Structure formats: C-alpha cells, structure tokens
C-alpha cells in the first residue's frame, strides 16, 4: 500500500507546531459540499429536494479556516454536486490532500471531470453490514466498488477503500474483508464508523470493535489516518457554513512514507 510522503510530513509538522500555536487545528477537515443538511426522508423515492451546493471557492475558504492538511469530502454523496471536479481541483491546488468519499455510482460518466494528482484520492465506501453478510446485496456492493476502482485506476487516479464498520460487524469477518481489499489494487484502506456522531466511540462496545478492526489494516500509516478521520467527525457535526467549521485537536501521523 502507498501513503503520500508529503501528507505524512505535513501531519508530522502540524503536530510539532501545535504546542507553540494559540490556535487548535485539525488534521483532517471533514466537510460536506452540501450547504444545508436534509433529513433522510427528504430523499425517499424521486422526491429529492433542490439542493444547494458550496462553490469551489467556498470549499477552499472552509479549508483555509480550518488549516487542515487534508480534506475529507463526505456527507451527502459528493458526486451529486454539479461541479465536484472543480471543487476537488481547487482544494488540491490549494496544496491540500483531498479524499472524495463516494459510493461510486455513475462514476464512469463523471470521471473525466477530475484531474489525477498525488494529492487526490477516491475513497470508495464499503459497509460491513452489506459485505460480510454475503448474499446478493453484498455481491452487488463489491461489484460496484470493483468497477469504480477499475475505472479510476485506468484513468490514473489513486484510490482507497473506506470500510464503514456497523455495530453488528464481526471482527474476524471484517478482517478477512480487509485482507481481500489488500489483494486488490487499492492504495490504502480507511476504517471508521461512518457516522457524524457527537457521541464518543472510544469507550463504547462499538468503538472498541472499530479499534480492534482498525489494527488489522495492513499499514500503520492508514491505521493512524483512520483514527484522525474518526476524530474529525466529532468536531464538524454541527457545521452548516464554511465559517462554522471548527478545528479539532487530533494528533497527526508520525510516520513518513
């Protein structure tokens, strides 16, 4: 697996500077390009509301305010954004590492909107509830992600698997899933709860299970990045506008690629 040496260096430098700074900064800005959150029932059937998206300039402004070396574009499926390619390019050109958290649907039609870069990753979601139980749902989910991975690799992009661990996940079965993902052409693996929750997971049964599964990621650097991603969710749950983004005090990666 491959982890950007530049990102390792910036995260390490951020940790060194933190004791001498009067501003607490996050390692990863967890940010949704959607301006306003919508309740799940708003997306039932074909009755999707008209959505308002942040511009590329507004996303860069949010990243500047948070001063985070990496930006995780998640929340509502970012491929629904009409100009998501411009958003990722603008963030990358501001010298940030960008991770597009996506289910990968319809990526074939839009991959041409993005520009390959060593600072840009597609992060493909895989939910343990779907995968490890097997059956038709799990098979379809794996096929979807495998096809999306094939498309981005042929186009010269980097990609990581984002394994979302549900409360019912089995540690042993998820461990086998991580081993299977390593055998594919993923550049990295990220494990998280996938939830923008204000409830701390560290001491909960779910949190302990995620920590145990995270230790099975076959890369120390991606294990640490997974910890930082989980921590970033706790600081951005209530953010509605770029100016509302609050930075977290998560530790930075210590190991270079």
Image (spheres, rainbow, N blue to C red):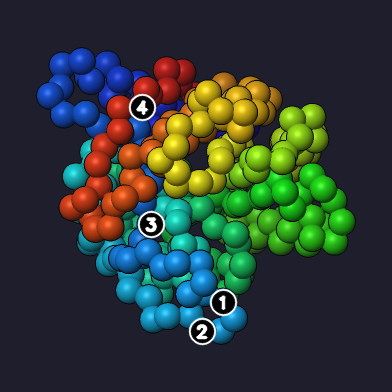
| Marks 2 and 4, the one that precedes in the sequence | 2
The residue that appears at 21% across and 50% down in the rendered structure is: 244
Q: Residue at x 24, y 41 (%)?
A: 246
Mark 4 or 1, closer to the camera: 1
Residues at marks 2 and 3 touching, judged by CB atoms closer than 8 Å: no
Secondary element under disc 3, as helix, strand or loop, is loop
Is residue 179 something that shows in the picture? no
Q: Which residue carries the number 3 mark?
A: 32
Could you give the CA–CA distance between mark 2 and mark 1, rounded to whole angstroms?
6 Å
In the picture, measured across the screen, residue 11 lies left or right of residue 74, that is left
Q: CA distance from mark 4 to mark 1?
A: 36 Å
From the viewer's perspective, is 168 left or right of 234? Answer: right
In this rendering, the label closer to the viewer, 1 or 3: 1
Label 4 residue SS:
loop
What residue did someone put label 4 on? 250
What's the distance in space between the residues labelled 2 and 4, CA to CA?
Answer: 39 Å
Circles 2 and 1, Cβ within 8 Å, touching? The answer is yes
């Amino acid at each position: 697996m491959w982890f950007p040496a530049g990102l390792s260096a910036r995260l390490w430098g951020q940790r060194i500077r933190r004791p001498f700074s009067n501003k607490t900064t996050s390692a990863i800005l967890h940010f949704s390009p959607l301006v306003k959150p919508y309740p799940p029932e708003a997306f039932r059937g074909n009755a999707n509301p008209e959505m308002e998206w942040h511009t590329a300039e507004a996303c860069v402004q949010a990243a500047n305010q948070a001063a985070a070396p990496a930006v995780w574009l998640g929340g509502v499926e970012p491929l629904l954004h009409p100009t998501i390619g411009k958003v990722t390019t603008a963030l990358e050109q501001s010298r940030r590492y960008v991770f597009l958290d996506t289910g990968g649907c319809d990526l074939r039609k839009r991959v041409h909107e993005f520009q390959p870069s060593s600072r840009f990753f597609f992060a493909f979601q895989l939910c343990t509830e779907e995968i490890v139980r097997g059956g038709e749902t799990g098979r379809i989910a794996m096929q979807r992600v495998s096809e999306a991975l094939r498309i981005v690799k042929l186009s010269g992009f980097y990609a990581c698997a984002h394994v979302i661990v549900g409360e019912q996940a089995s540690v042993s079965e998820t461990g086998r899933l991580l081993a299977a993902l390593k055998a594919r052409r993923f550049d990295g693996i990220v494990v998280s709860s996938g939830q923008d929750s204000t409830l701390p997971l560290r001491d909960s049964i779910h949190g302990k299970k995620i920590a145990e599964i995270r230790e099975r990621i076959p890369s120390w650097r991606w294990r640490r990045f997974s910890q930082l991603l989980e921590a970033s969710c706790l600081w951005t749950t209530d953010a509605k506008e770029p100016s509302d983004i609050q930075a977290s005090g998560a530790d930075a990666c210590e190991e270079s690629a």
